Image: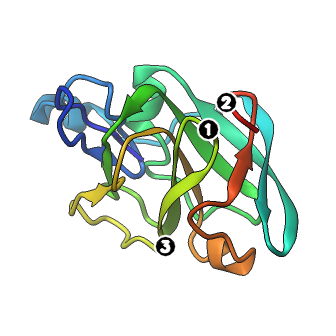
């Protein structure tokens, strides 16, 4: 996933690559990304839904470059795996699926750890922006269809030290 920043406006992210708080990407920057990045540092994360507590192992995309590359060129993720984009202060964001070969579920998360919006089964390789729908501090990308499998809905809690309130 890849987020793109547009000062206080709607940022665009390559669901497989780029984050909102990062300067806008130039064409030559995209051309430089030609392969998947190595697996990033992983941490535990939980999503609490009406069906229970669901545990995940997530890679942490914290730096601008890690967020820019995101899940580009990666095959489909396994169950209970994901990537968490730590975006900083609350902001509007949008992601895209450029160079992402597998569908993803994108969970847009507020500072308190509550899910604001879920974009389910995003379209591989699409450059259509997928907006957050409000101010968020993080985005969790899961294997396409996994949010529905655990019955995740807006308002559900995401437990991870990055989020406040949970």
Q: Which one is in front in this view, the residue at disc 3 or the one at disc 1?
A: 1
Q: Secondary structure at mark 3?
A: loop
Residue 157 lies, with reference to residue 144, above or below; the image says above
Using the image, tell me which numbered label, if any, was put on residue 164: 2
Q: Residue at x 53, y 65 (%)?
A: 105
- Asked which quadrant contains residue 119, the reply is bottom left
Q: How many marks?
A: 3
Using the image, tell me which numbered label, if any, was put on residue 61: none
Say which of 133 and 41 sits in front.
Answer: 133
Q: x, y (%) of residue 89? A: 43, 24
Say which of 57 and 5 sits in front.
Answer: 5
Q: x, y (%) of residue 158? A: 70, 49
Q: x, y (%) of residue 145? A: 60, 77
| Crowd band around label 1 with a 10 angstrom C-alpha radius: few (<14), some (14–19), many (20+) | some
Say which of 21 and 50 sits in front.
Answer: 50
Mark 1–mark 2 CB contact (< 8 Å): yes
Q: Mark 3 or mark 1, which has the lower sequence index?
A: 1
Q: Secondary structure at mark 1?
A: loop
Q: Is residue 10 left or right of residue 27?
A: right
Quarter of the image where the C terminus is located:
top right
| Crowd band around label 3 with a 10 angstrom C-alpha radius: few (<14), some (14–19), many (20+) | some
Using the image, tell me which numbered label, if any, was put on residue 120: 3
Q: Secondary structure at mark 2?
A: loop
Residue 66 lies, with reference to residue 81, above or below; the image says above
Q: Residue at x 39, y 52 (%)?
A: 15
Q: Mark 2 or mark 3, which has the lower sequence index?
A: 3
Using the numbered discs, state the Cα–Cα distance from disc 2 to disc 3 in whole angstroms.
25 Å
Task: Farthest residue to the left: give it.
Answer: 27
Q: Residue at x 66, y 72 (%)?
A: 146
Identify residue for label 1: 112
Q: Mark 1 or mark 2, which has the lower sequence index?
A: 1
Say which of 57 and 76 sits in front.
Answer: 57
């Amino acid at each position: 996933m890849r987020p793109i920043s547009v000062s206080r406006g709607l940022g665009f992210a390559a669901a497989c690559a780029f984050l909102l708080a990062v300067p806008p990407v130039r064409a030559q920057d995209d051309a430089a990304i030609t392969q998947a990045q190595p697996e990033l540092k992983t941490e535990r994360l939980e999503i609490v839904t009406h069906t229970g507590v669901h545990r995940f192992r997530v890679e942490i995309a914290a730096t601008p470059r890690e967020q820019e590359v995101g899940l580009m060129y990666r095959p489909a993720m396994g169950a209970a795996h994901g990537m968490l984009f730590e975006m900083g202060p609350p902001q509007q964001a949008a992601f895209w699926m450029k160079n992402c070969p597998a569908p993803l579920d994108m969970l847009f998360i507020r500072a308190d750890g509550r899910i604001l919006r879920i974009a389910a089964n995003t379209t591989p390789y699409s450059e259509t922006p997928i907006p957050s729908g409000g101010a968020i501090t993080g985005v969790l990308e899961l294997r396409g269809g996994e949010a529905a499998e655990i019955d995740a809905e807006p308002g559900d809690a995401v437990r991870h030290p990055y989020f406040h309130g949970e």
